[in-house]
Amino acid sequence: DTAVSQTPKYLVTQMGNDKSIKCEQNLGHDTMYWYKQDSKKFLKIMFSYNNKELIINETVPNRFSPKSPDKAHLNLHINSLELGDSAVYFCASSHPSLGRNSPLHFGNGTRLTVT
Amino acid sequence: AQTVTQSQPEMSVQEAETVTLSCTYDTSESDYYLFWYKQPPSRQMILVIRQEAYKQQNATENRFSVNFQKAAKSFSLKISDSQLGDAAMYFCAYRSGDNYGQNFVFGPGTRLSVLP
């Protein structure tokens, strides 16, 4: 009965590879996000989708491509991985339609290590 | 763009004592929402408390309460009767009240240690 689930939990890969992180939420929320948490624990938004439509696209290398097949899923694909991509990536969802104080519900994060 | 500042990178508190974590933010908006999240070593992000800017009453959740000073743009978190399980990173977050302001902006975090 996990609310926001993302897989895998850990991802270790070599530079230059392509990898994907999957995210699913069963809360019925209409907005999903990807956040990156760097080694200093700073959280920064990467993308946000509302009902499968991209609404926030921060300055992120175009090697990162989000895909939302439906409003319950938001996957993150990363091409040509670089050392600097090593971080924890969080998927999250919220439902502003229910009230603009609707908080973010986070997945448990994916720790990506690029060697 | 909105910014959130947490001026205390690290704090410590004795078990059963009270500690206050600071948060200030910069915005020109009058309608917005504020949140505190806790991240224990498990790295899970847990909502602690939230506050609507239009409400003058400070939010309270059990041992957690906030001191919201809208004019000063300050949103501090008070933890009473601190427990060992409160040890974590604490993040303050801002969300615009705009319908399209769905971005949550986070502060850099405060690492709280609880001493037995």
Image (cartoon, grey):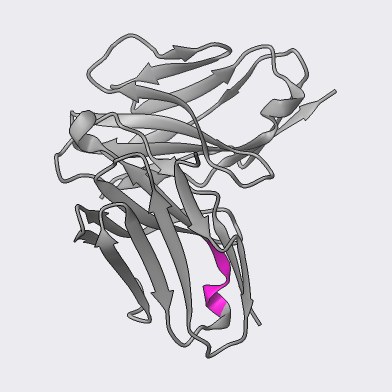
Q: Position of residue B30 (x, y in %)?
A: 18, 29
Q: Is residue B17 above or below residue A31?
A: above
Q: Is residue B56 above or below residue A99?
A: above
**Residue A59 appears in view:** no
Query: Which residue appears at 33% of the width and 9% of the height?
Result: B57
Say whether residue B97 is left or right of residue B94: left
Residue B109, picture quadrant? top right
Query: Which residue appears at 51% of the width and 47% of the height?
Result: B108
Q: Is residue B23 above or below residue B82?
A: below
Q: Position of residue A112 (x, y in %)?
A: 58, 69
Residue B106, picture quadrant? top left
B19 within the magenta span: no
Furthest toward the bottom, the residue is A16
Say whether residue B113 is left or right of residue A59: right
In this view, the residue in front, A15 or A8, is A8
Span shown in magenta:
A84-88
Query: Which residue appears at 32% of the width and 69% of the height?
Result: A66
Q: Position of residue B42 (x, y in %)?
A: 67, 45
Say whether residue B89 is left or right of residue B103: right
Say whether residue B43 is left or right of residue A94: right
**Residue B12 appears in view:** yes
* Tally of numbered discs: 0
Query: Which residue appears at 35% of the width and 19% of the height?
Result: B69
Q: Position of residue B116 (x, y in %)?
A: 85, 23
Furthest toward the front, the residue is A1
Furthest toward the left, the residue is B99
In this view, the residue in front, A98 or B52, is A98
In this view, the residue in front, A19 or B73, is A19
